[in-house]
Image (cartoon, helix red, strand yellow):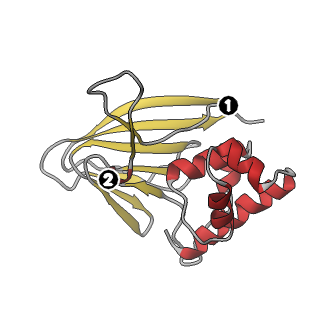
Amino acid sequence: MEQDILIQISNRIKERRREKNITVQELAIRANVSKGLISQIENSRTIPSLIVLIDIIKALEIDMNEFFKDIRSKSNYFPVLIKRKDEYEHFEKEHASGFHYHRIFTQSINRSTVDIVVLDLMPGSSRPMVTTEAFEYKYILSGDVEYYFDDYKVLLNQGDSMLFDGRLPHTPKNPGSTTASMLVVYFFEEKK
């Protein structure tokens, strides 16, 4: 992620926290992270993981569309959050043997609709750029998928994931010779 986007995200966290009269310590408790981490994020000294960023946004009680509104890269890139399979948080629950959890994404569902689908993308399939009125989360179940956003392209391999604002024009392509499959979760927030 480019530095200017990180600074915008850091500044937005700090601004929203101050608008809501929440201390750094209170936000840390609500987001279940350390006070030092919040301070480092707000001062652009560290990059939060996707999960931590979403937990902070949730703790600030701001919807995702509002939080990311107008955050754009000065070099014409935009906030597409990529999560590679080796970056997922691994955890275990008590009294369980052989259960290996991988936390790939957490989202509060408040005044929203969630639509979960599996998309099979055939080799050579194509469509024009589209937009949706939702945040879109993609998890690659099998194969490789190229995602296009205007002039920006992201290659996702099996196990990778991505979160982006569906209002950005986008389309996937299957560069392989076999079917690619992905889990797709759409987060439609209700209009106020």
* Residue for badge 1: 110
Q: Quadrant of residue 40?
A: bottom right
39 or 124: which is nearer to us? 39
* Residue for badge 2: 86
Q: Is residue 116 left or right of residue 140?
A: right
Q: Quadrant of residue 82?
A: bottom left
Foreground disc of the pair 1, 2: 2
Amino acid type at image mark 2: Asp
Q: Residue visible at 41% across and 25% down?
A: 94
Residue farthest toward the left in the current orientation of the protein: 177
Q: Is residue 173 visible?
A: yes
Residue farthest toward the top in the current orientation of the protein: 95
Disc 2, SS: helix
Disc 1, SS: loop
- Labels 1 & 2 near each other (Cβ < 8 A): no
Disc 2: CA contacts within 10 A as few (<14), some (14-19) or many (>=20) = few
Expressed as whole percent of the image width and height from the top left, the position of residue 1 reads 49, 68
93 or 147: which is nearer to us? 93
Expressed as whole percent of the image width and height from the top left, the position of residue 149 reads 44, 61
Expressed as whole percent of the image width and height from the top left, the position of residue 185 reads 46, 36
Amino acid type at image mark 1: Asn
Q: Residue visible at 51% across and 73% down?
A: 2
